[in-house]
Each structure stands twice: as C-alpha cells, then as structure tokens.
Amino acid sequence: MRAPSISGVMTAATGVSTALFFVLWWALEGEENPWVLAGLTASVVMLVAFAARLTVVRRNRMRSLHPTRRQGHSMPRPSGNGMQSPGLHSAGLRALQKQSAEADARDLPPQAHRDLYDLCTDYLHGAEQALQSPTLAAEGRLALRAGQERVRTLQRHHLLTWARGSARAFTHEAQQRVRLYEKLEAANRALECIDSALKVYPDEEELKVSARAVREFITSSRVAHWVELAERAAFKGYYRRAIDRYRDALFYLTRDGADHDLEAGAERITREIELLRARIATGKSAVDAAPSNRAKGPRD
C-alpha cells in the first residue's frame, strides 16, 4: 500500500483545521469572541501537521544523503571467526567490492566514501584476527592475504575520494561566504579533512597539494580582508588607520604567504604604506606653513 504524500497530508490538515474553525465558531456562538478560541484551535492543528511534515522531510533527506550507510549496516561486520570460513570471507569481499563499485558509479556524497573506508578498516581488522588463528588452513591464509591486498587498495581509494570531495565542498562553501570568519571556518574544515587523511597516508602527494591550496586560500582571504579595510580607511582620509591595516595584511602575508606570492604582495603593500606616509607628511607641512603665510600677509 502506498503511503500518502506529504502534500496530500498537508491538504487534508488544512481542510480539517478549516472545518474545525467553523464548527467551533458555531458551537461557541453564545460566548464572547468565539472566533478567537476557534482560530487558536485550528492553528494548533496546523502547527502539529507542519511539525510532522518537517520531521518526515528531514528523515527523507538524511536517507537520501547516506544510502551507503544503510547498505553498510545490512552487511555483517567482519569478525575474526567469520573470516576463518572461506565462504563467508569470499561473500564479505564480494559485497564490499560491489558497494565500492556502486559508490563510484553513482557519484555518492563524500560521506558515503568515508563509510566505505570504515567498512574496509573493519574487514582488515577481522582478517588480521583470523590470520592469528593456528587452526586456519594454508589455503585460507592465502585467500585472506589476497583479500587484504584488494581491500587495502579500496580503503586508500575511498579515503582519498572522501578527503578530496569534502575538501572541495568546504572550499567552495568558503568561497561563497562574505564574512572573513565564515570563510576561515569553512576552509579550516576542509583542511581538517585533508589532515586526517594525511595521518593515514602521509606520503600522498595529492593530499599535500590540496592542503597547500587550502592554506593559500586562507592566507589570501586574510590579506584581502585587511587590504580592503585599509583601502576604506584611506578613502575616508584616515591615513594612520589605513597604515595599521596594511601592516596587519603584511603580517599575515609574510607569516603564511607562499614564496611566489610573498615578494609581489609585500612590495605592493609596502608601496601603499609609503604613499600614505607621504600624504601624512604633506598634510603636516601644509598645516605648518599656513600660519606663517598668514603672518606674512599684513607685512606684504
């Protein structure tokens, strides 16, 4: 039997609340302001229906975002005892390979690949326990070791896929943000994903390149923020404040900036600071010269 749609339930709730409103209004006709109580009762019905709709929508969204998580729970977690059976070992390996292929083919969210990485970790742990058993036959040992090699390849693939996808999503989110702290928060979450993968595969060049790119984005966002504040202050004539903001930008650039961006950026900021100092000095000279010019006026 097909469950009623959410829109159908909301339509029915609207009809019920409307009917209840008029029925109560008619029943309380002798009371003072009967429409108030009727309206409140109908509103409660609509609020309950809306809350139920919101709960269903959230549950469906979570299910759509994590389809592999449900599949992973349907597959028994590998254990040492189960791995000693060639049939169970082969079935677990085939199920893991099938889920891996489906995740790649369906372009699932990054979290699905992280779940598969965890499943691979469980498989390898169970296989290691089985290999320690003295009763395991030689053929079973060979099969387990071959399965371990395959699963290690899958494990690496899915962790890198998760780190790459998560970092890309968080970096894109950071680029869309306007406030600096929101940019840095999203970028740091991307960096955390990459760093967690680097702990497992410290020699992975792809992860190192991604980490450098995210750090350069963080630095450029900070520098751009302080440069913008300095330009605003200079436009308003607050030259000393602008110099302080340029110094803040120069601090983050020299501390965190990449070598290929450091020299050009530092030179530009230093030039702006010198121009602002020249404006301040020119303004002081004009102020100092003004009284002397006025004093010379009557004598001329």
Image (cartoon, rainbow, N blue to C red):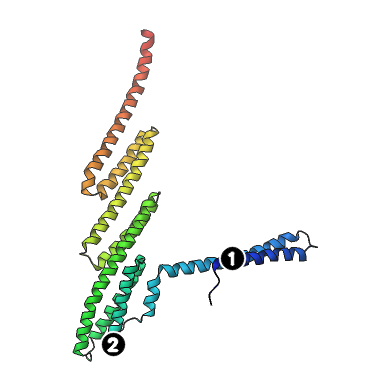
Residue 29 picture location, percent across and down? 79, 62
Callout 1 amino acid: Met
Residue 258 picture location, percent across and down? 23, 49
Above or below, 73 relative to 113: below
Residue at position x 26%, y 82% in the image:
127
- In-front residue for pair 153/243: 153
Left or right for 87, reference 24: left
First in residue order: circle 1 vs circle 2: 1
- In-front residue for pair 100/165: 100
Q: Which residue is mark 1?
A: 10
Above or below, 177 relative to 143: above
Q: Quadrant of residue 66?
A: bottom left
Tag 2, which secondary structure? helix
- In-front residue for pair 131/285: 131
Q: Which residue is mark 2?
A: 87
Do we see residue 44 in this rendering?
A: no
Residue 259 picture location, percent across and down? 21, 48
CA separation in Å, label 1 and label 2: 51 Å
Do we see residue 242 in this rendering?
A: yes
Tag 1, which secondary structure? helix
Residue 230 picture location, percent across and down? 35, 39
Q: Quadrant of residue 155?
A: bottom left
Q: Quadrant of the C terminus?
A: top left
Label 2 packing within 10 angstroms: few (<14), some (14-19), many (20+): few
Callout 2 amino acid: Gly
Total number of numbered discs in the rendering: 2
